[in-house]
Amino acid sequence: MSSAAPPGTTFLTGWGRTSPTPARLVRPATAEQVAETVRRAPERGVAARGLGRAYGDAAQNAGGLVVDCTALTSWSLDEATGLVTAGAGLSLHDLMAALVPRGWFVPVTPGTRHVTVGGAVAADVHGKNHHVDSSFGAHLRSLTLVTAGGGIRTLTPADDLFWATVGGMGLTGVIVEAVFRCVPIETSRVRVDTERTRDLDHTLETMAATDDRYRYTVAWIDLLARGGRMGRSVLTRGDHAAREELPRGADPLEFAPRALVKAPPWAPDGLLNPLTVRAFNEAWYLKSRPGTSVQGLAPFFHPLDFVDGWNRAYGPRGFVQYQFVVPFGQEATLRRIVARLSAEGVVSFLTVLKRFGPGTPGMLSFPMPGWTLALDIPAGQRGLAGLLRAFDAQVAEAGGRIYLAKDSRMAAGTMAATYPRLAEWRKVRDEADPDGVFRTDLARRLGL
Amino acid sequence: MRNALGSVDTVLLLGGRSEIGLAIVERLVRDGARRVVLAARGATGGEPPVIGDAEVHLLDFDASRPETHGEVIEAAAKLVGDLDVVIPAFGVLGRQADYDADPVAAAEAVAVNYGGHVSAGLYAARRLREQGHGTLVVLSSVAGIRVRRANFVYGSAKAGLDGFAQGLGDALHGSGARVMVVRPGFVVGRMTEGMTPAPLSSTPGQVADAVVAGLRSGAETVWVPGALRAMFAVMRVLPRAVWRRMPR
């Protein structure tokens, strides 16, 4: 990272590689060791960290202690019920590698497999099936949490602390284990319908009209298309394929995804610029032939995992990921923001639009019924702070909100205005952690 | 916490009535800062000024009493939490002729312009190092880059301060805390009232704009205006015989 850390500390950033801060990093091997670490928490507090895929400062703790949970990787599957008990540090990648050949799939996966179970709970992550299956928290049976006093508690959905922890960004304690229900699958393939839309209205209409026919849907938007083509998209919608849809002789449950390319560590700022991104977008739009095909799980769910370390392509200044949701009925706000992004020529490598279904009872959980748009922008882009602040105001006005797992720059006031259950969450958190043992840079920035 | 795009949340201004200092604070508040501490002599007697919609606190601060500087930094942190930006903006300019006439006054001015910044800077650095983040903004001056005979008491204090700030910045490297050195030329404002502006002068607002831009980009050194960097690359190597003849 940018500077050498003092002995015993490490500079940490999120996936966007902005705002590095130093912390002492420990990697306990058991839940009991996590508890022991929390009991000896330093004055600057403790933060939990998984694979560092939150884009901003959610798993950083400047001057304090960070508990790297990635050694907590135990798991077991009850084949009769599909219930999985997993250590918080287990990645969805490793979990899929274990489950898929046995005929099971995770209930929710975000756009990358390289997140941990603990992170999936703390951010209450969503995937392409949100419109039917909601987010990760909806599938949880129980959680095991190391609390502020260093105790180990098992929580169920009947506990307030459970729903303060789901989506609670690790600020209620260190999640050490989760039990959740998985989905039976016949094959490790997805039957995918691809369709190209002309413009944003066509995209929204098509998604609204056809979403409920598929378990998984998403639209990739070409943000650089302007004028009459503004908001043109590639819709991909799929379902787990049945055995008879596979060619004869194929191993129906094979799962061997691999990263094909490694992003160069020396990627200069500006490698992703309007020219290269426009070329990429054009190529992506054209190569996405309409029709039906059978694809592997990985290419369908995790296209970004094909380039290992793709976040480096934005160069040393890093990038900002912006994801908001606006409720149904507020499409005008979505249109206005897309139009502005398109007019500004914002260089977003992958911009994704998704229709959300009902959320979970997670007090700080992000999803709500409506439209969510996610994009990434190089941090060095001129005027970016003002542009995003203007979007924040429009999103708040529309009754929407910004996703904490992606955020690295929202103002505390915006957070307070857009998460209506924040006060309730604070009350539960203050009871569970009266002395503020669990602290992150995100919590400091947003005044949580 | 400084966010991904360089906006900050809390600011401590030491020398809480400084024109340049307040101009910086106003801009940081416009940029999203929510909590401000203004520390100045006799500050707690008055009403805090309104700065945007920020929460503004006042603290008593005397630059000439280094033994109190540590308490002021801690009191500020108690009021607003982590200090994202600390700006020691106190100082006196004075006239060289007056210093020639009154060497004690000269020593007192240097004690504020240099010594005061050393104690305040070191206490602030200690706090920022513990936090693992934060920026100390040091208001140096081109007067200290090459000291002129026309104001060598003031200039020599600024020379000391500039060197101090660079050394402190290097000492903090790797701690997460940073020092940003600001080198304005002649600043047209209250402090220089009645003086004829030198070439490449700036206003407190322009200095503040440059500071805020530097905080955003993470700059180590900011010249205001930027052209002074090149100008002083030349000035620094002018022969002594020529430099001595500089009219002011």
Image (cartoon, coloured by chain):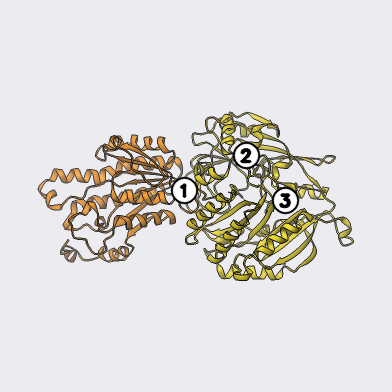
Using the image, name the chain to which the residue with label 1 belongs. Answer: B
Residue A355 appears left or right of A428: right
Nearer to me, A366 or A19: A366
Nearer the camera: disc 1 or disc 2: 2
- The Cα–Cα distance between marks 1 and 2, rounded to whole angstroms, is 26 Å
Per the image, the residue denoted by label 2 is A363
User: For residue A131, which numbered disc appears in the image?
Assistant: 3
Residue B87 in view of the camera: yes
Q: Amino acid at mark 1?
A: Arg
Q: Which chain is yellow?
A: A
Q: Residue A438 sits in which quadrant?
A: top right
Residue A160 spot, x, y in % from top left: 65, 32
Task: Identify by letter the chain in orange.
Answer: B
Disc 2 residue type? Answer: Met
> In terms of image quadrants, where is residue A342?
bottom right
Please rate how many residues cluster around mark 1, counting C-alpha atoms within 10 Å: few if below 14, some from 14 to 19, many from 20: many
